[in-house]
Image: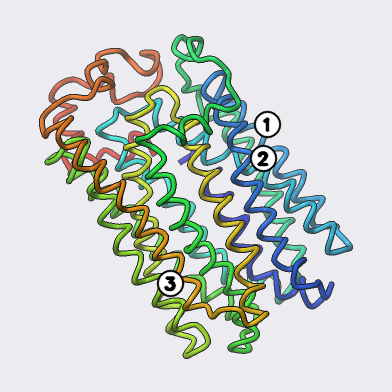
Amino acid sequence: LVCALPGLLQFLCGSLFLPALPDITEEFVPTPFQATATLSVYSFLSGIVPILWGPISDRYSRKWLLVGNLFLYALLNYINSWNRTMNEIILMRSLIAIPLASFFVVVTGIITDIFRDKERAFWLGIRNLPGFLSVLLAPPIGGVMVYLFGWRSTSASQALLGIFSMILIMFMLPETLNKERAKKIKLNPLAPVLIMLKPRIIPNALVQGIGFAAMYMTVAAVPLTFPEYYDASDIVIGLSLVPFAVGSALGAACGGFSTFLIRKKLGLTGTLVSSLFWNILCLPAFVGWGYTLEYEIWLPIFFSGLIGFLRNATTPPILMFCMQEVPGQSSAMNAGLLAVQFVFGSIVLAIFPSLIANGVASWGQLMLGLSILEAICFIPLIYMTYTTYKMYPPGSLLPSEKQESEKLLAATTFSTNTLSGSQREFRESSIGYISDSTEFL
């Protein structure tokens, strides 16, 4: 629960800001470029900065990197609540992305430290649940806060939550990084980029990047388009994001659990099969959202909820596969994936609204184009799934699994590696995962 708090803040930073965007627009009357820049520049930096945080987390510390960045996050949000111009808001939102970018990277590293390969898919799905619950509650709460107290209240509340999380992590979270193993890792700021360029990683990264960009556009389009198309108020905009949050939470859990079950049958290939299954289902949802926007308001809301479910179900299998490909560099790997996703998202967010405004294309045509591009990227992924099945047939052990007699953490720190044989058999059952969850949470 403690290490899930930073992920909760990462979701809050967007969920509370989206209902505030129409109020900011009314107060400062920004240009179309400035309005989208509050989201696109923030997204771009959210993708680039993890490249720095990933190697630092793998080499030096998980805990203290979180503590320092939580303090910076709180400070920047407090300053943001006093901004007086649109350019200042764009600048502060961009700076907030710097500490924020470390949260998911470090938490992924903590999960890697604690759980073995075969257990991580489930917990990678569970990792997202507190954040998705915040997405569920934050938009309507944010809409009410903006209506009653103005948009500045959303930044002030994030500052208070940042300080609260920092204090809890400082006193309640132990250092999980295996210092002996970390000493063998060379600090290389380019490690996330090099990992993404590996032949068995890059097809997954491209699919994740394009899929994330499509999902990000459907969420960001709500405050940008709903006031124009449906004359939606701040509260309606907040409520419109609730189905996406519910779908995202359920999808993350289903993606982790389905990957766990499929991997038990197919081994490493199961992570790729699970990823392909969920990613293929995303394509008609993307197209459906694009072609129903501007019609009845419930249609794009329905498709955004479906996209949240399907798209977030793809994350646990992709993360698990990539972790197995680059053992010992989980934070750097996650940083690379985040970079690809948010850079793609920022590009789409910067270009699509302008194309729509100038009448170059419709939302449906643009989302169809993104879906076709993602489908093309499935070709190498399908081939890689076949070769992986040949290389690692069901029942075979990966090199990282053969070394799992080595403890990930010191004996005094909680880890599933310290369980006895009977306890491990119980832990690896679905009932064990659910009933034993309080041991970690």
**What type is the residue that disc 2 sits on?**
Pro
**What type is the residue that disc 1 sits on?**
Gly
Q: Which residue is mark 1?
A: 68
**Image quadrant in which the N terminus is located:** top left
**Considering the numbered disc 3 on the image, is that residue within a helix, a strand or a loop?**
helix
* Image coordinates for residue 18, horizontal then vertical, percent: 63, 67
Q: Which residue is mark 3?
A: 368
Q: Nearer the viewer, mark 3 or mark 2?
A: 3
User: How many other residues sit within 10 Å of disc 2, few (<14), some (14-19) or many (≥20)?
Assistant: many
Q: Which residue is mark 2?
A: 99
In the displayed structure, does residue 92 sit left or right of residue 140? Answer: right
Is the residue under label 2 in contact with that under label 1 (CB below 8 Å)?
yes
Disc 1 versus disc 3: distance between alpha carbons?
Answer: 42 Å
* Image coordinates for residue 273, horizontal then vertical, percent: 22, 48
**Considering the numbered disc 2 on the image, is that residue within a helix, a strand or a loop?**
helix
User: As displayed, is residue 229 above or below residue 37?
Assistant: below
User: As displayed, is residue 339 above or below residue 64?
Assistant: below
Disc 3 versus disc 2: distance between alpha carbons?
Answer: 34 Å
- Residue at x-position 41% and y-position 64%: 308
